[in-house]
Image: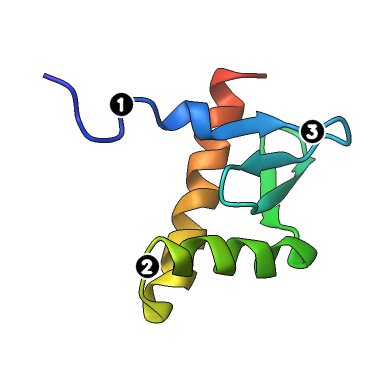
Amino acid sequence: MTGKHKNWHRAWSRLPNGRLRHISGAEFVVTRGSGYADINAAPETLGEYQTYELARGVPVHDLAQRLIRLAREAGEWLERNP
């Protein structure tokens, strides 16, 4: 039996500049270190992200938590797609 997030990885892509982009418009900057990677949201993409999520019916008070979850998801996608 599959969960509702079965094809979550399809919402992600890597841009030519190295950023990871979610279908929502949020882009994440990846900074690699020795044995780790920092993943931070690109501030200039947050407006597009908010517009997309609000149009989907996500409450305003859930936007920050969802962005944090997307950053974790970006890390998981990065592990699977080095």
Measured from the top left, where is residue 30 in percent x and y?
75, 43
Badge 2 marks a residue whose secondary structure is loop
Image quarter of residue 58: bottom left
Q: On residue 62, which mark appears?
A: none
Q: Residue furthest front?
A: 55
Q: Nearer the viewer, residue 30 or 34?
A: 30
Sequence-first tag of 1 and 3:
1
Q: Secondary structure at mark 3?
A: loop
Q: Residue 37 location in percent, x, y? A: 68, 40
Name the quarter where the C terminus is drawn: top right
Q: Which quadrant of the figure contains the N terminus?
A: top left
Question: What residue is at 61 percent from the left and 29 percent from the top?
Answer: 78
The three-letter code of the residue at mark 3 reads: Leu
Q: Is residue 69 left or right of residue 22?
A: left
Q: Which residue is mark 3?
A: 15
| Residue type beneath disc 1 | Lys
Neighbour tally class for label 1: few under 14, some 14-19, many 20 plus, Cα within 10 Å: few
Instruction: Name the amino acid, label 2.
Output: Val
Left-right relation of 50 to 21: left
Name the N-terminal-most of marks 3 and 2: 3
Say which quarter of the image contains residue 62. Answer: bottom left
- Mark 2 lies on residue: 58
Q: Position of residue 2 (x, y in %)?
A: 18, 22
Residue drawn at the location 56% of the way across and 51% of the way down: 24
- What is the secondary structure assignment of the residue under circle 1? loop
Q: Are marks 3 and 2 in contact (CB under 8 Å)?
A: no
Looking at the picture, does residue 44 appear above or below residue 39?
below
Q: How is the image coloured?
A: rainbow
Question: Which numbered dot is residue 6?
Answer: 1
Q: Residue at x 76, y 34 (%)?
A: 34
In front of the other: 17 or 75:
17
Mark 2 or mark 1: which comes first in sequence?
Answer: 1
